[in-house]
Image: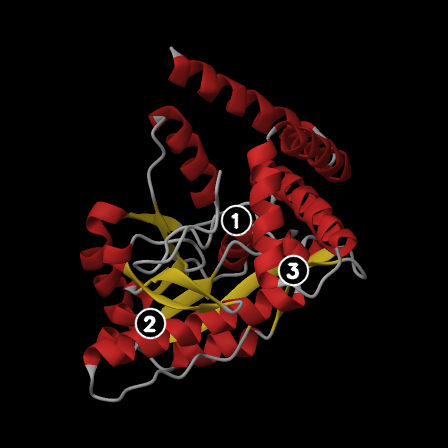
Amino acid sequence: MREWFEYAAVWMVLKTMGVLPRAMARSFAATVTAVVFAMVPRLRKTAEVNLRLAFPEWTEAHRRDVTHKMVRNFGWMAAEFAHFPRLTAANIEKVVILEGHENFLEGQRRGKGVLYLTGHIGAWELSSFAHALYGYPLHYMARPLDNKRLDEIVNQYRCSSGNKPIFKNESARVMLKILKDSGTVGILADQNTMPEEGVFVDFFGNLACTTTGLARVALHTAAAVVPGYAYWDETIKKYRLRFEPPVELTRTGDAERDILENTQKFTKVIEEIIRKYPDQWVWIHKRWKMRPKGEPPLYDF
């Protein structure tokens, strides 16, 4: 019964925002996320700790301003998600424009497939959706939601532009086949990872446990690793889907060292993007939750 009510609530919100004009939907969603954020102290505390760790030189006022804009960005992205059924190849340019797309095409030309390196930056759901409408669909790594009805509608929206999910229990086999066929796989590589699945690398001057999956696949397949992210540009009132040049892999002949050094390299790319657009990253995620053995926790709540 609880799953049914969750599904009904999400369905109603999606459909309601979907029929509203885009500007109104974005304003409504931003208001809702601000209310939710104010009602959940744990989220505020996480954002405060993270921003102090990442930007110790900032004033408290600066951190509060970034947090406020981050919450607004969450609402905007929810509204954009609700409007996915309205987006087509004919009108996508009114919402998202491409920038640095020659970098993605360079990765494709190498003929080994593309690993689309990204994170929870800007409108991350919109980035891959829009790219598919521009003619470049991809497969994305997906963790099924516990609520099956909810998972079904979320993936229905995500896949309506031509993208397809790869679920964790089939990820390695499917991913290798996609890359062998010169396809594209999108990977979010900016979240806390369990030690058995990651390594500790520097992220904003603090060690963060980070997935090694991207480095392992890239080294094994020689696929091009191309950073891509959709950030909001206030000057044009649109998102720019920006692609950076392919990240050249480090190969020393020492497998474990290569995994560590390339994971660090990918993490540094994400950090540099966040530094450019700090109000468009998810500071409410406990990125430094896992600690090296013997180190005290950074979150005491």
Q: Is residue 158 above or below residue 91?
A: above
Closer-to-camera residue (283/134):
283
What residue is drawn where x is 81% and y is 61%?
A: 235
Nearer the observer: mark 2 or 3; the answer is 3
Inspect the image, locate mark 1, and give the three-letter code of the amino acid beneath it.
Glu
Q: Position of residue 288 (x, y in %)?
A: 45, 55
For label 1, the SS is: helix
**Picture quarter containing residue 276?**
bottom right
Circle 2: element type = loop
Question: Marks 2 and 3, how far apart in space?
Answer: 30 Å
Task: State which tag comes first along the sequence, 1 or 3.
Answer: 1
Q: Residues within 10 Å of mark 2 (few under 14, many from 20)?
A: many
Q: Residue at x 32, y 66 (%)?
A: 214
Mark seen at residue 292: none
Residue 182 is situated, as x and y percent measured from the top left of the image, at 31, 70
The spot of residue 102 in percent (x, y) is: 54, 78
Image spot of residue 22 (x, y percent): 72, 39
Secondary structure of residue under mark 3: helix
Q: Residues within 10 Å of mark 3 (few under 14, many from 20)?
A: many
Mark 1–mark 3 Cα distance, whole angstroms, equals 18 Å
Chain-order first, disc 2 or disc 1: 2
| Residue picked out by circle 1 | 125
Please name the residue that numbered disc 2 is placed on.
113
Residue 278 numbered mark, or none? 3
Q: Is residue 167 visible?
A: yes
Please say if the residues under marks 2 and 3 sit with CB atoms less than 8 Å apart: no
Q: Amino acid at mark 2?
A: Gly
Which quarter of the rendering shows the N terminus? top left
